[in-house]
Image: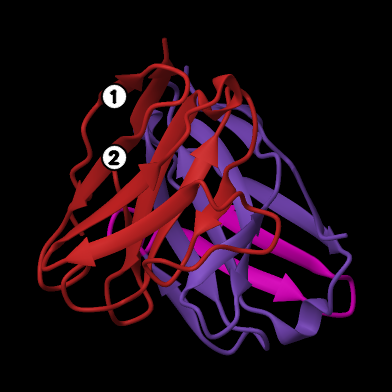
Chain colours: A purple, B red
Amino acid sequence: QVQLVESGGGVVQPGRSLRLSCAASGFTFSSHALHWVRQAPGKGLEWMSLISFDGNNKYYADSVKGRFTVSRDNSKNTLYLQMNSLRPEDTAVYYCAKDYSGRYTIDYWGQGTLVTVSS
Amino acid sequence: QSALTQPASVSGSPGQSITISCTGTSSDVGGYNYVSWYQQHPGKAPKLMIYDVSNRPSGVSNRFSGSKSGNTASLTISGLQAEDEADYYCTSYAGSYTWVFGGGTKLTVL
C-alpha cells in the first residue's frame, strides 16, 4: 500500500532554515508528481508546492515562492522541501502527498511533520 | 490564490443528510471539473472522498456524493453515521499547476 513518511520537523528560530524529507513506498515513485501541503495549528489546509515526476518542473504557492524549494531523488524514493527564511506564520504540520495522475488532485497523504518557528 | 469558502460548521442527526458547500471563482471551481473533497479526523491525514467533482475512489461509501453548479461545489453525505464526524475540505485546481483549498467545515453528528 502507498506509504508516505515525513521527517525533519522541529523547532527553528525565525530566519533560519530547515529541510523536510518524505520517504515513499508502495507505488512507482518515479512515475508520479508529488505535492507539499501544510496546515497551521487549528487552521485549514494550504497547498504549497508540486514537483513533476522527473523533478524538472516545480510550482509554488505565492506565500512560499522564493523561500521554499522542492526537490526529489528518484533513486532514493524521497521528496524534499528546503525551507529558508522561516517566519512564525510558517508554523504548521507539513504533509507530503501523492498526485493522482491525470486527475489534478491528491490521492494519498503522509501523516505530516510539525514545524514550529519560534524564538 | 484566495481560499475557497466553506461553512465553518454543519451538523445533523444520524440517518439524516447534510450538504457542505464550497464557493470559489471562475478561475478555480467554476473553471475546471477538478474539485475534490477530503475527510480529516483529528490528528489524522486527510482522506480523499470525492474527485473530479463527483467521482468516488474505490472503497468510499456511496453515501458520499459531489456536485457542482457554477462557482460552487457541494458535498452531500446521506444516512449520517457517527464515524462521519470529522473536518471536510474541498480543493480545486486553479490553473498553472496550482491548487486552492477551502477553509474546512467541521461536521458534528448529533
| Label 2 neighbour load within 10 Å: few <14, some 14-19, many 20+ | some
Q: Residue at image x 36%, y 73%? A: B34
Residue type, label 2: Thr
Q: Quadrant of the N terminus of chain B?
A: bottom left
Measuring from the top left, give residue A9's x and y in whole percent: 67, 35
Q: Quadrant of residue A14?
A: top left
Chain letter of the residue beneath label 1 in the structure image: B
Q: Is residue B8 above or below residue A97?
A: above
**Residue B10 shows which numbered tag?**
1
The magenta stretch spans residue A66:
yes
Q: Quadrant of residue B53?
A: bottom left
Q: State how many labels appear.
A: 2
The magenta stretch spans residue B35:
no
Could you say which is closer to the camera, residue A107 or residue B83? B83
Could you say which is closer to the camera, residue B107 or residue A84? B107
Task: Say which residue label 2 marks.
Answer: B19
Per the model, the C-alpha gap separating discs 1 and 2 is 8 Å
Q: Are marks 1 and 2 in contact (CB under 8 Å)?
A: yes
Residue type, label 1: Val
Q: Is residue B102 above or below residue A119?
A: below
